[in-house]
Amino acid sequence: MRIRKREWTKQELEEAEFYIASPETYKGKWKSAFEVKRPIHIELGCGKGQFIANLACSHPRINFIGIDLIDTMLGFAKRNVEQIYEEKRKEIDNVILTRCNIEQILTMFDENDKIERIYINFCNPWPRGKHHKKRLTHTRQLELYKTFLQKNGEIHFKTDDENLFLNSIIYFKQAGFEILWKTYDLHSEKIQESIETEHEKMFSEQGIKIKALIARLPK
């Protein structure tokens, strides 16, 4: 989805204490990027940030990193984080936003970071066969995530695209992940916690069923 550039984005991100412009400087030492050392969860392709803002605000004992490639998206994410934390009257101390090409994710993480959980929500399905390797759940990408995802770490995945979902189940198994849980209709099941993303709300209103799974990297 194309999004129009906003002139305010660069300055606001530079001024935000929870935005890191050069994530590669923290490679192997992301725990030190936060004031308090806690388990780290990341969202790949955080978009406008409503999901990670709500998630981080609700889980103060976990540190979160939201990653996107588009500066304008990160600008909106920054504003959403600020708004949600202000509404809950909480200090922003457990979430960081940063810019990175996820195909080159190993420029910012390595085996010393020991990420506990990865969220992938409504990523580009890249429907044409020749583009499948660009999928964030493709086996090639999963092998990269295994570098920094700790053993027994999890990947939580949501999508509206059935073909992507079915293929992703295969990708996870090929990469050695265990599928702990999956559903072809998320909203028909009683889930204890499921924060709705912007895309999720939009697709659900169109009558499109949301597919989701949790995969674990065995010891």
Image (cartoon, grey):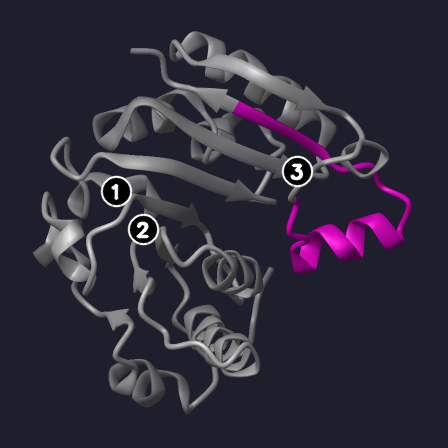
Question: How many angstroms separate mark 2 from mark 3 (CA)?
Answer: 20 Å
Q: Which mark is residue 63?
A: none
Look at mark 2 in the image and give the residue it sits on. Answer: 101
> Between residues 72 and 86, which one lies in front from this camera angle?
86
Kind of residue sitting beneath label 3: Thr
Residue at image position (78%, 34%) is 190
- Asked if residue 70 lies left or right of residue 88, the reply is left
Q: Badge 3 local density, few (<14 within 10 Å), some, or many (20+)?
A: many
Answer with mark 3 or mark 1, whichever residue precedes in sequence. 1
Name the mark nearer the viewer: 2 or 3: 3
Q: Badge 1 local density, few (<14 within 10 Å), some, or many (20+)?
A: few
> Between residues 104 and 210, which one lies in front from this camera angle?
210
For the residue labelled by badge 1, is the local secondary structure a helix, a strand or a loop? helix
Q: Quadrant of residue 197?
A: bottom right
Cβ atoms under marks 2 and 1 closer than 8 Å: yes
Residue 38 coordinates in the image, percent (x, y): 26, 49
Q: Which mark is residue 104?
A: 1
For the residue labelled by badge 3, is the local secondary structure a helix, a strand or a loop? strand
> Between residues 82 and 148, which one lies in front from this camera angle?
82
Q: Is residue 204 magenta?
A: yes
- Asked if residue 198 lies left or right of residue 131, the reply is right
For the residue labelled by badge 2, is the local secondary structure a helix, a strand or a loop? loop
Q: Which mark is residue 159?
A: 3
First to last magenta residue range: 194-214
Q: Is residue 94 above or below residue 16?
A: above
Residue 36 coordinates in the image, percent (x, y): 20, 59
Cβ atoms under marks 2 and 3 closer than 8 Å: no
Residue 119 coordinates in the image, percent (x, y): 47, 41
Quarter of the rendering occupied by the C terminus: top left
- Asked if residue 58 lies left or right of residue 116, the reply is right
Kind of residue sitting beneath label 2: Asn
Q: Is residue 169 magenta?
A: no
